Image (tube, rainbow, N blue to C red):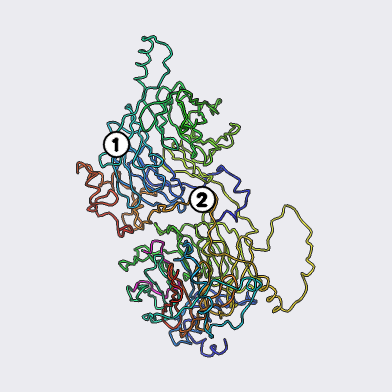
Amino acid sequence: MNLSLIDPFVLAQDYPESLTGNLRSGHATCVKFNRKGDFLASGRVDGIVVIFDVETNGLARKLRGHTRQIQSLSWSRDGRYLLSSSQDWKCVLWDLKDGSRVRTARFEAPVYIAELHPFNHLLAVASLFEDQPVLVDLSSTVPVKHILPSAPKRPRVDEDSAINEKQAAQDAKQTTCVTVFTASGNHILAGTSKGWLNIIETSSCQTIHSTRLSTSVIIYLRLTASGRDMVVNSSDRIIRTIHMPNLDDPDLNPENIKVEVEHKFQDVVNRLSWNHVAFSSTGEYITASTYKNHDIYVWERSMGSLVKILEGPKEELGVVEWHPHRPLVAACGLESGRVYLWSVITPQRWSALAPDFVEIEENVEYIEREDEFDIHPPEEIHKRQLDLEDEDVDVLTIEPVKGEIEEENSFTMPVLLDIDDSESSEEIVAVGPGTMRRKSPGEGREWMNGVESGGSGDERGKKNTANGTPKSQGRNRKRKVDQ
Amino acid sequence: MDSEYNGSRYGSPDELGAASYYGSPTLRRASHSTRQSSAEVRRHRDRDSEDVEESPDELDHTFYRDETRRGRRRSSASSGENTVRMGDAGPGPEDEPENEILSPLDRMQPASHLNVHYKQKLILRGHTKGVSAVKFSLDGRWIASCSADATIKIWDAATGKHSQTLEGHLAGISTIAWSPDSKTLASGSDDKSIRLWDIHTGKPHPVPFLGHHNFVYSIAFSPKGNMLASGSYDEALFLWDVRAARLMRSLPAHSDPVGGVDFVRDGTLVVSCAGDGLIRIWDTATGQCLRTLVHEDNAPVVSARFSPNGKYVLAWTLDSCVRLWNYVEGRCVKTYQGHRNEKFSIGGTFGWQNDAAFVVSGSEDNRIYIWNVRSKEVLQRLEGHEGAVLGVDAHPTENLLVSCGLDHTVRVWRDDGGHNM
């Protein structure tokens, strides 16, 4: 509702310009905004997932359940569920209503990236380290895994069995590095270690089309919110944007799918590699963090030109994310584990401070109104004013705001008043009056041992905890709001 | 009127103490000779406290801010039944407006949908000093009232049964606000702290919100419950992170005590008002002032709130007016008059029946006033209180009003003529 009062020139600024803050809770390795953009989930090196409230920059929830670094995070559409994947070979689906674990899926390898289906929070796709990617059905308590193909689908042109065999042998060596759902969730896009893009049908788990985009590994793929554009980060130091064909067209013939590269972004001078890429909220801009460099590049997509280099932190940045509808970029510092935020700084308009202030470009001569110095009795003025108040007012009808996500029973996360925030600032504990010491490593992580020694810690954890933390640990939980 | 109370006033230790301790209200008053400064406002309150023969501290700043009704949509009930009733069940003779202000709008649309007929249902006694604010919880189950006796009482909204007394503040409480989930109550007190209370246990949250340098005058929860805005006698507007009890932003908002704060429906704007006569609209995210509203007379503004749809701001001023502002255009669109409000921070709220809205407010003539939002006519005057009525709130779903005042009571009013909400 503030849009009507904000300077339109400020609103027209649609990419961030300056470093405006940072968030800290442990050492963050990956971040993700939810669809509404009011929360930012952050996965940490120690396996804890924390959720920041974007409005307050404070901690909204802590989720404990992984024992190693978090690799990726994925929000459900309504913002109630969060899927985290970790190097401890697990994916956990969290219910943010009470912080409980809904499902835990175990794999035979560390997980690269796991993503939830856009409309079904009980279906996920995961790409694994040196293993076949899997489609995981989480609807039953024991997750069902369907293995997805990694080998590209090649047109059978020649009948030379020797060549075919050679190709098949080569394809068998390919692994999938990244898997994402399309906007409708009917297809999965997979990028392989040999630079192929596979389009896999979700229902049949079959590759319907393959295109070679690059000669080297495809590190990351992601789509715009509309799903019409895709950005591909490859280890050949080129970021490609691609117009997606409409895969949900019922008349679609997989043979005719054409995947065409729209732009290639690269730094030809410095030959930079890109750690991570993200689309802006509308897809007009692409942003990327740079390998062994402190900068974040922002390109615009209509012309393919570089518009901004975001600077600030003196460290290399890893995962970079763009807020779903504001010019706000978040990126993780690799060394400090801070989450840096870039945004637009709006100057205070002085005319807002007093109703008779007007901001003018240059001096203007004041022209006095005809009746400016006329003297009327105050009663008459008052009466005249009251008579003027004849317009119809409606204080009740709520007009839908453009671009606002209004859903019937949308989920709101409960506000917890007892979040243990001890690790959010520097890890220093007070030992006595005036004496502080650095927190010793491992302190406050007794829960980890507890869960591990309990064998199948998940099930046990679910029974007697709300947040994956056994109550017997007697942590600082004074009051639960979500009881 | 003033001189009537002045006689014995200056001997009160509280008054002198307040004057010397909290800076120089007299100086401030001198510098704003054209209007009644907040210091004077406060003094007037003290006078009145003597009027009801209580301790001099009895009546602090009181004000109103209604948290519970924000974000609520209007009732979808049809207006048919009420329209039928229009003819016969009009307001009684004593409800006839005396100085009715008829605007052209009324003449064009004589058939107003509004036909309120509230009657007193319950008197809740228990507070030992004046009650400064009263609020329905958002789920409609509870009534919370806070008082100069430093306690908060929770009552069952349906039966009026006393449920809890929350004790812990060291001085009188001026303001309360319900969290959106109705499980937590926030209170702002003259001990400069803001506390959160778990209403199931009746215990305060261990970490109070400390930071204000003077009495906390008004508080409001954001619609999500993650932020709290507070206005204080220290003339600042604070935004708090509720989860961490951390001060997020301190806005040097005004040059007089901040009498009212409120969040807009979607939480992106905060309104604050103060004794300096200004109403300011702030951007929650950036902390910038986006608009300032001021009426020519610069009368001290004691209470302000957004309309249910967030398009207007309703503000109470000490010239006995309640004004409705279109804050985008910076224009006053309606002025509601008839009540008396010259000394106290009186509050009120919006209510509605059958898609037609009314404004309800307390008054220093011991009555509650209900105006039609569109026509500005007084729809009803409720009598019963034996002292100035300081706060009124409307139930989120039923035709219930609750009021509180200097007579130490909380009163519940019901409109039995309009069950069709």
Q: Which of the two labelled residues, at mark 1 and mark 2, occupies the earlier sequence position?
A: 1
The quadrant where residue A392 appears? bottom right
Which is closer to the viewer, label 1 or label 2?
2
What's the amino acid at mark 2?
Glu
Q: Nearer the viewer, residue A93 or A90?
A: A93
Asked if residue B164 shows in the view, the reply is: yes
The vertical placement of A293 against A156, above or below, is below
- Which residues lie in the magenta part? B165-182
Q: Is residue A292 visible?
A: no
* Direction from residue B401 to residue A403 in the image, left or right: right
Three-letter residue code for mark 1: Asp
Residue A265 among those drawn in magenta: no
- Quarter of the image where the C terminus of chain A is located: bottom left
- Asked if residue A283 is positioned above or below residue B129 in the image, the reply reads above
Q: Does the magenta stretch include residue B177?
A: yes
* Residue at which label 2 appears: A404
Name the residue that disc number 1 marks.
A88
Q: How crowded is mark 2: few (under 14 residues within 10 Å), some or many (20 or more)?
A: few
- The x and y percentages for residue B340 are 56, 81
Q: Residue at x 41, y 61 (%)?
A: B180
Residue B141 location (% of width, % of height): 37, 68
Estimate the x, y position of residue B46 in percent, counting from the top left: 49, 82
